[in-house]
Amino acid sequence: MTGLVILLVVVAVFGFWLVGIYNGLIRSRRSYENAFAQIDVQLTRRYDLIPNLVETAKAYMKHESQTLEAVVAARNAAMNGLKAAQARPGDAAAMQTLAASEGQLTGALGRLMAVAEAYPDLKANQNMMQVSEELTSTENKVAFARHAFYDSVMCYNVARDVFPNNIIAGMFNFKEAALLQIEDAVKREAVKVKFD
């Protein structure tokens, strides 16, 4: 009888231990999903600002319709990429699609801002300055949200990969989460300083 009680206690402890590991993996996954939701909020805000930017620029840049159309097309592609990523945060293919579309949008916005430099009246326009400032602020918030997402994904992946969690993760199909690595359309190179 004592042996049966000991066996039941050992089985119960083992069961609680497995449940604890499983619940820890769920908490980690929910954490990175929440962190991605913060990226989602900021990217949506960015997408909402772009039509205002394009409309303001349109009045001044009548001969630059191709640039404006490229921004609108890139925005629409980025919105589609975000929708796919919303359904599967952390999924490598979804993150790669979103990153590629965000890179294209960043490039299109960069070209728009470069062309806008040639229009002094546009640069001085109050709406243009306000939208540009809000866009810059939103870009900073996106970067901050991405950093929090990276931290959450790293914590989840570590929790998933360590022993014995990796056994439980494999049994319950906890897949590795992918980062959102948005590449700038224009690669930044280090400034070379040379003293003669």
Image: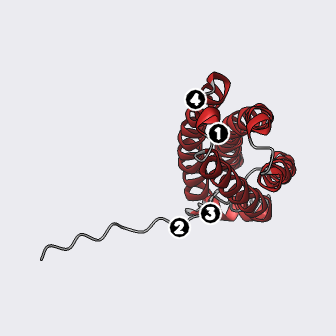
The residue that mark 1 highlights is 35
- Dot placed on the residue nearer the N-terminal end, 1 or 4: 1
How far apart are the alpha carbons under marks 4 and 2? 29 Å
Q: Which residue is mark 2?
A: 187
Tag 1: amino acid: Ala
Q: Residue furthest left?
A: 196
For residue 27, above or below residue 73: above
| Mark 4 residue type | Ala
Q: Which residue is mark 3?
A: 185
Label 4 element class: helix
Circles 3, 4 touching at the beta carbon (< 8 Å): no
| Residue where numbered disc 4 is placed | 124
Residue at (62, 33) in percent of width and height:
121
Mark 1, residues whose alpha carbon is within 10 Å: few (<14), some, or many (≥20)?
many
Q: Disc 2 or 1, which lies upstream in sequence?
A: 1
Label 3: few (<14), some (14–19) or many (≥20) C-alpha neighbours in 10 Å: some
* Image spot of residue 35 (x, y percent): 64, 39
| Residue 37: image location, x then y, percent | 72, 37
Q: Could you give the CA–CA distance between mark 1 and mark 3, rounded to whole angstroms? A: 24 Å
Amino acid type at circle 2 is Lys
Q: In this orientation, does residue 70 appear?
A: yes
Between circles 1 and 4, the one closer to the viewer is 4
First in residue order: circle 3 vs circle 4: 4
Q: Are marks 2 and 1 in contact (CB under 8 Å)?
A: no
Q: Position of residue 28 (x, y in %)?
A: 64, 44
Q: Earlier in the sequence, mark 1 or mark 3?
A: 1
**What count of labels does the image hold?**
4
The residue mark sitting in front, 1 or 3, is: 3
Tag of residue 176: none
Relative to residue 136, is residue 31 drawn left or right?
right
For label 1, the SS is helix
Structural distance between the alpha carbons of marks 3 and 4: 26 Å
